[in-house]
Image: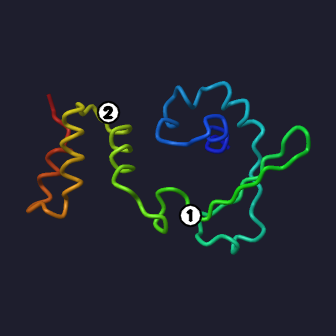
Amino acid sequence: AYYLASGVVDRDFDWSHISMEKILDPAIAALQDCVEAVPDTDPSRHTWEWGATVTILLRDGRKVEATVNEPKGSGPRGIHWSDVERKARNLMPSSGKSRDEIERVISVVCRFDELEHVDTLIELLRHSRD
């Protein structure tokens, strides 16, 4: 319910939606209370197992419906490096890493296949024990 409500309110759903600020957003919370999950009666109509159809019933009785067969970032659609970088920049600050450290991690991940040893990445990810 939260994912759908936040997507409707913000017209997008991204990594910012895991923040407490978004989770506690009154507009999202109000809409979330109106969301009802209804099992799909024919999941075979989706081309991938995580496909879904969303139907929004408006106050005036109209229905707005949209189907997503392959969600953004799923295997069938592929994952773009820009999405991986954005995810790292949004989530890694909570690890205590500095912006410079995060950028070094991203740089190493982007050229992972060129590394001689995975230890290079492991060392960057390791928590310092100050």
Looking at the rendering, which quadrant does residue 94 occupy? top left
For disc 1, the marked residue is: 70
Disc marking residue 110: none
* Mark 1 secondary-structure assignment: loop
Q: Quadrant of the C terminus?
A: top left
Q: CA distance from mark 1 to mark 2?
A: 29 Å
Q: Is residue 15 above or below residue 99?
A: below
Give the image location of residue 63, x and y in percent: 84, 50
Looking at the rendering, which quadrant does residue 53 occupy? bottom right
Give the image location of residue 47, x and y in percent: 61, 72
Give the image location of residue 10, x and y in percent: 61, 35
Mark 2 Cα-neighbour bin, 10 Å: few <14, some 14–19, many ≥20: few
Mark 1 or mark 2: which comes first in sequence? 1
Q: Residue at x 20, y 48 (%)?
A: 107
Q: Residue at x 38, y 44 (%)?
A: 87
Q: Nearer the viewer, mark 1 or mark 2?
A: 1
Q: Amino acid at mark 2?
A: Pro
Extreme residue in the bottom direction: 44
For disc 2, the marked residue is: 93
Relative side of 94 to 69, left or right = left
Q: Is residue 53 above or below residue 104?
A: below
Asked whether the beta carbons under mark 1 and mark 2 sit within 8 Å of each other, the answer is no
Q: Foreground residue, 60 or 108? A: 60
Q: Amino acid at mark 1?
A: Glu
Relative side of 117 to 58, left or right = left
Q: Is residue 16 above or below residue 121?
A: above
Relative side of 93 to 109, left or right = right
